[in-house]
Amino acid sequence: MMNLSSSQMCDILFSQLCLRVPPTTAIPYGDGVHQANIMKETDGRSYTLLERETASMAALLLRGHVIVPMQLVARVPAALFYWPLIQLAGAATDNIALGVAVGSKGRGNLPGATSDIRATLLLLLIGKCTADPAAFQEVGGEEFFRGLLDDTDSRVAYYSSTFLLKQIMTENPEDYQHILQSLIVRAQQSNNEKLLENPYLQMRGILQLANDLGSRL
């Protein structure tokens, strides 16, 4: 019996979930997590180049050359996204001052490398948890995603922070508005507008402010 690595098993899983997108239209899956900003390409050259560089479905998905229907994600147990994400954490290399405080989203990584696989697993898990509250609780709920803010992979930290912000805005809109106003005041007082620069820094600032105020989001 052939032993497969976690990366190989993930690629098999992705290949079963992914549908190819025509090369004239690319949908960057990762940027903004669920916001499908459609990017038109003049021809299929970048698509063909990427196909030559890697056979990895993770790389193709993150660059919008394949899509995953949510109906298929709904049928996959959350554990199949969760456990490889955790197991592959030690193999991922990214950081570089955490993508300069997560301004970078891992674009310096080799296509199809462990970082791409983990980013894809997380995005699929986020999709699963968004559609299925039971799956969200199964993986540890908000605490699990807060823990991923400390991940050394900048995309994992970025996608987790974006998901957490959307959760707070949806479930506790009044609390979110209140603490966001407080964060804006703190940014102005400290002359540090970077506190509001991206979802990761916003989430970090909100958690720190909530801790300082003794409140809980």
Image (cartoon, grey):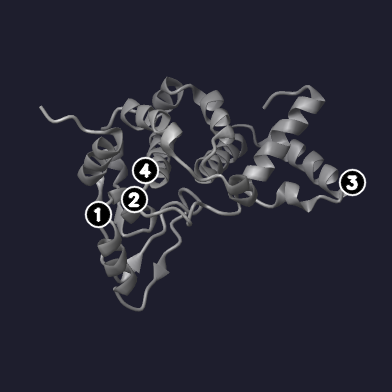
Which label was assigned to residue 55?
1
- Tell me whether the residue at label 3 lies in contact with that at label 1, contact meaning CB atoms closer than 8 angstroms: no
Residue at 25 percent across and 66 percent down: it is 22
Mark 2 and 1 residues: CB-CB less than 8 Å, in contact? Answer: yes
Q: Is residue 161 above or below residue 191?
A: above
Circle 2 packing at 10 Å, graded few (<14), some (14-19), many (20+), is many
Amino acid type at circle 1 is Ala
Left or right, 184 with reference to 206? right
Q: Which residue has dot 3 on it?
A: 189
- Image height of 87 relative to 94, above or below: above
Question: Farthest residue toward the right?
Answer: 189
Which type of secondary structure does the marked residue at label 3 adopt? helix
Q: Position of residue 58 (x, y in %)?
A: 33, 48
Quadrant occupied by the C terminus:
top right
Q: Position of residue 112 (x, y in %)?
A: 34, 50
Q: Are marks 2 and 4 in contact (CB under 8 Å)?
A: yes
The kind of residue on which mark 2 rests is Gly
Q: Earlier in the sequence, mark 2 or mark 3?
A: 2
Tell me the distance, in whole angstroms, between the alpha carbons under discs 3 and 4.
Answer: 40 Å
Q: Is residue 34 left or right of residue 76?
A: right
In space, the residues marked 2 and 1 are separated at their CA atoms by 8 Å
Label 4 and label 1: CA atoms lie apart by 12 Å
Q: In the rendered structure, which disc, 2 or 1, sits on the residue that comes first in sequence?
A: 1
Q: Residue at x 61, y 39 (%)?
A: 169
Write down the residue under mark 2. 112
Other residues around mark 3 within 10 Å, as few (<14) / some (14–19) / many (≥20): few
Q: Which residue is mark 4?
A: 117
Labels 3, 1: front one: 1
- Three-letter amino acid code at the position of disc 4: Ile
